[in-house]
């Protein structure tokens, strides 16, 4: 038995039904993470009224979660490599569940915002661990592709399902159950992880955590994402935006210097980016998620403010998108091992771009079945395939103990893409709507024009993803070439 086999072989206990339960646990953990990034949106007006939020601070309910998630994802992924995938997975589940319970019982804005921040910390620890577990447990290429297919389908569909679930809970129950529902789910998930998820394969040595690198990259990412998230309120020229952006850039530059010159055991070995598949996949993820998660926001506004749908009807309108993402992610899983991720990425992003350009033509006279259903299905199926293939490409050619690092990189890139995409397209949309209203109330036609411009921008993000996908290797490299990359990334 070779040293490589020792690194990658799954423990004997994870066979048969246990493998399916491992997959279920990882998908459920990722579902909770993505769901809570979107489920709160529909309930924000009710939350603002009940907890007496100032309208300028209401955005903190979402930003506290997003900023902390993005800041800690890279560190969370590395923790799974250093201290064990099951241990870190359990820590993330416990923290996420506890913070959800506190948030659901909050009686004032500060408590809710802090709870959302700790939810984000739990998600940042849990999300990379789910991918790490899948990558080290499913070692057969076909089984691994199917596992990533399910994980990707859940990741994409959860964002759309969050809008539906948020509308249903807000309309028929209390907004508090948006968060409190995580308590029973978290308890079941914690018990399942304890029972079926194997610990990381034993390593001869455990490397110390790169504390300077962890501090600079975490604070740098948090500052940068905070600056981007504030831009749609204060404008790109504001000190409240430029200050965090410049500070974040300085911290990230210091992080790169620490990794390259000073860290004996770097948090992110920069040699990992010499793996062409990993580097290209992260670029694809940035553009793809910038398109997809921006669409969630503008599609909601399009349905409610242009077509006049209620929150519940808006949630139901997301069902075809969720179904398309799930079918795309799961259905393409048998194709990726045969063709490699590159053709799937190119085809899926091209399909998504076409669907977004079609959806951008929606106006107040449109009907759902005649004008919305078709492009939504195209977008859903295309993005489902992209999410699957990106996950495969981003973890290609790496040893098992680097799975958490690759997972953290991928999830961090996705979070950055969603933040940058939404803010930049929101600025375009607002400028178009303001230009067509001249200070008066915005008409449905003006809103449709603004949202259509944003969706066109999302289509361009997807098209940029096609160009990035051209850099993904056509086929898997030889074992020797993979070995060279692994040594460079170690």
Image (spheres, rainbow, N blue to C red):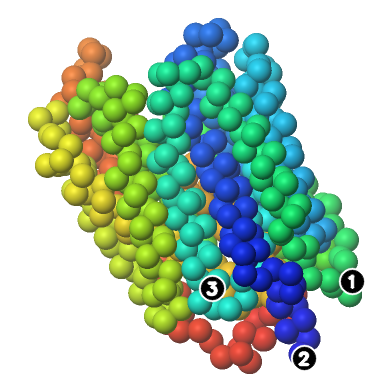
Q: CA distance from mark 1 to mark 2?
A: 20 Å
**What x and y, as percent, mark residue 182?**
61, 33
Q: How far is disc 3 from disc 2 in space, using C-alphas?
A: 22 Å
Residue that label 3 marks:
143
Q: Which residue is mark 1?
A: 205
User: Residue 239's x, y, as percent?
Assistant: 57, 28
Mark 1 crowdedness (10 Å alpha carbons): few <14, some 14-19, many ≥20: few
User: Measuring 61% from the left and 90% from the top, which residue is drawn there?
Assistant: 479
Whether residue 65 appears in this view of the structure is yes
Q: CA distance from mark 3 to mark 1?
A: 29 Å
Q: Find numbered disc 3 in the image and state the secondary structure of the residue it sits on.
A: helix
Q: Residues within 10 Å of mark 2 (few under 14, many from 20)?
A: few
Q: Give above or below for 235 relative to 143.
A: above
Instruction: Please rate how many residues cluster around mark 3, counting C-alpha atoms within 10 Å: few if below 14, some from 14 to 19, many from 20.
Output: some
What x and y, as percent, mark residue 284? 44, 62
Position of the N terminus, as image quadrant, is bottom right
When the figure is inspected, residue 478 is found, relative to residue 198, above or below; the finding is: below
Residue 246 quadrant: top right
Examine the image and state in which quarter residue 413 appears.
Answer: bottom right
**Is 32 left or right of 169, judged from the image as shown?**
right
* Res 488 visible: no
Mark 1 falls on what kind of element?
loop
Above or below residue 408? Residue 169 is above
Mark 2: secondary structure:
loop
Dot 2 corresponds to which residue? 1
Image point (62%, 58%), residue name:
21
The mark nearer the N terminus, 3 or 2, is 2
Q: Quadrant of the C terminus?
A: bottom right
Please report whichever mark, 1 or 2, sits nearer to the chain's N-terminal start.
2
- Tell me if 51 is positioned left or right of 428 in this view: right
Q: Residue at x 41, y 26 (%)?
A: 168
In the displayed structure, 444 sits above or below 210; it is above
């Amino acid at each position: 038995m070779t040293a490589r086999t020792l690194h990658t072989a799954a423990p004997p206990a994870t066979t048969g039904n246990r493998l399916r339960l491992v997959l279920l646990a990882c998908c459920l953990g990722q579902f909770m993470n993505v769901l809570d990034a979107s489920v709160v949106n529909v309930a924000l007006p009710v939350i603002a009224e009940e907890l007496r939020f100032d309208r300028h601070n209401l955005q903190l309910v979402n930003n506290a979660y997003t900023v902390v998630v993005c800041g800690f994802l890279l560190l969370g992924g590395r923790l799974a490599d250093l201290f064990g995938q099951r241990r870190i997975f359990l820590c993330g589940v416990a923290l996420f569940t506890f913070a959800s319970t506190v948030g659901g019982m909050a009686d004032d804005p500060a408590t809710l915002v802090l709870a959302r921040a700790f939810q984000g910390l739990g998600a940042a620890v849990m999300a990379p661990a789910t991918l790490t577990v899948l990558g080290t447990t499913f070692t057969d290429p076909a089984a691994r592709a199917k596992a990533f297919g399910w994980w990707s389908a859940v990741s994409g569909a959860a964002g759309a399902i969050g809008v539906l679930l948020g509308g249903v809970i807000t309309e028929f129950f209390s907004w508090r159950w948006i968060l409190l529902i995580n308590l029973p789910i978290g308890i079941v998930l914690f018990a399942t992880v304890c029972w079926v998820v194997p610990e990381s394969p034993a390593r001869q040595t455990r490397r110390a955590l790169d504390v300077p690198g962890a501090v600079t990259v975490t604070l740098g990412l948090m500052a940068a994402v905070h600056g981007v998230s504030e831009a749609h309120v204060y404008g790109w020229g504001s000190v409240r935006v430029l200050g965090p952006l410049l500070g974040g850039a300085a911290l990230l530059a210091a992080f790169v210097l620490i990794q390259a010159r000073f860290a004996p055991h770097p948090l992110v070995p920069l040699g990992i980016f010499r793996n062409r598949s990993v580097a290209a996949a992260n670029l694809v993820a940035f553009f793809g998620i910038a398109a997809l998660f921006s669409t969630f926001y503008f599609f909601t506004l399009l349905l409610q403010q242009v077509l006049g749908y209620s929150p519940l009807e808006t949630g139901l309108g997301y069902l075809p998108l969720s179904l398309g993402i799930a079918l795309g992610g799961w259905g393409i899983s048998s194709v990726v091992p045969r063709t490699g991720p590159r053709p799937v990425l190119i085809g899926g992003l091209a399909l998504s771009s076409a669907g977004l350009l079609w959806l951008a033509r929606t106006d107040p006279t449109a009907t759902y079945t005649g004008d919305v259903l078709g492009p939504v299905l195209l977008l859903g199926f295309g993005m489902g395939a992209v999410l699957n293939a990106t996950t495969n490409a981003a973890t290609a050619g790496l040893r098992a103990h680097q799975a958490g690092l690759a997972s953290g990189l991928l999830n961090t890139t996705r979070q950055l893409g969603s933040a940058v995409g939404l803010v930049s397209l929101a600025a375009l949309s607002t400028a178009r709507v303001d230009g067509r209203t001249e200070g008066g109330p915005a008409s449905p036609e003006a809103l449709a024009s603004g949202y259509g411009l944003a969706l066109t921008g999302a289509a361009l993000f997807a098209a940029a993803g096609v160009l990035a996908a051209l850099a993904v290797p056509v086929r898997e490299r030889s074992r020797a070439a993979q070995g060279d990359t692994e040594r460079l990334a170690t």
